[in-house]
Image (cartoon, grey):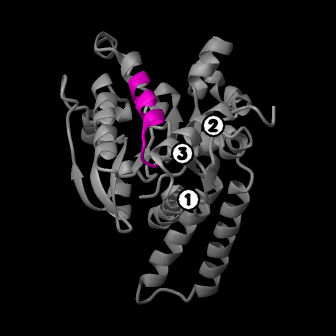
Amino acid sequence: MATYLEFEKPIAELDSKIAELEALAARKDGPSITDELTRLKTKSVKQLKQIYSDLDAWRITQVARHPDRPHFSDFIGSVFEEFEELAGDRHFGNDEAIIGGLARFRGRSVVIMGHEKGRTTEKRLKHNFGMAHPEGYRKAVRLMDLAEKFSMPVLSFPDTAGAYPGKGGEERGQAEAIARGTQRGLSLGVPFVTLVIGEGMSGGAIGIAAANRVLMMEYAIYSVISPEGCASILYRDPSKASEAAQSMGITGPDLLKHKIVDSIVKEPVGGAHRDPQRAMASAAKALDAALRDLEGLTPAQLRRQRRDRFYAIGREGL
């Protein structure tokens, strides 16, 4: 059953009518209502395009968090081949919030890693809703070390509301682990491409996103803090998250203007959750193009390009 967001109620009502008419038409003794069905379907598509042509930052945030949006596990199954998961940080344990390992991508051997939120209650608890502990970022560093040792590109997929802020994480050095992940990304001597697929919030995202190319899906968001967190600080009221989102510059066009991201991957009309396979195919094409741009660069050139990229953030368009 499709999940509709609050602002999609007009579409939900139309789709409900369409489903009723389709059920009626399927009956052997049912009336011929082909013309009415065609009219309603055309109206639904038109309304969907109209609504999604003018989404504000808060509505885009809702789309980025949509429960049916493709997760990293979906990308593993659809975009990559021969995935072999590598677990553990060799210090404390394995963090299920970040999944990573070896894979094949369009003829290349690559190292991939990303946040996994989970869909069912059981999976969400297993993956801690995509909020990684320190061992998740130390696992990411281990994977980056492996990638450099065997000259394999790195692809990362942030999708998190932030790193886990609990007592255990702080005791095991959460801030230090994120910093090490960021540092290792910046020092890699192999191509490194990041695609923000949903939420890219705070250090929880940047710990696996210090890349040569940072891409984002059209309805993803990327920021140092969530709208709720920002509202709690600015207004002392998390219920003003929608107001905060409008001024945070967390959507693709603003991030592109300030050179925080390098390109935006178009999604199907109505968001990636309406056609996940098509959305992931577009993402794969963009990832392939980004890797091709980086092929042939020496380790020193890759590090210099990455450094220059991050130094350029915010210098234009302010």
Are discs 2 and 1 less than 8 Å apart at CB? no
Question: Quick one: label 1, few (<14), some, or many (20+) residues within 10 Å?
Answer: few
Q: Which corner quadrant holds the N terminus? A: bottom left
Q: CA distance from mark 2 to mark 3?
A: 10 Å
Q: Which residue is mark 3?
A: 301
Q: Which residue is mark 1?
A: 293
Q: CA distance from mark 3 to mark 1?
A: 12 Å
Residue 308's disc is 2
The amino acid type, in three-letter code, at marker 1 is: Asp
Q: Residue at x 24, y 39 (%)?
A: 122
Name the foreground residue: 62 vs 254: 254
What is the magenta range? Answer: 179-191
Residue 120 makes an appearance in the image: no
Q: Residue at x 56, y 20 (%)?
A: 229
Name the foreground residue: 282 vs 245: 282
Question: Quick one: label 3, few (<14), some, or many (20+) residues within 10 Å?
Answer: some
Question: Quick one: label 2, few (<14), some, or many (20+) residues within 10 Å?
Answer: few
The reply to whether the magenta stretch includes residue 182 is: yes
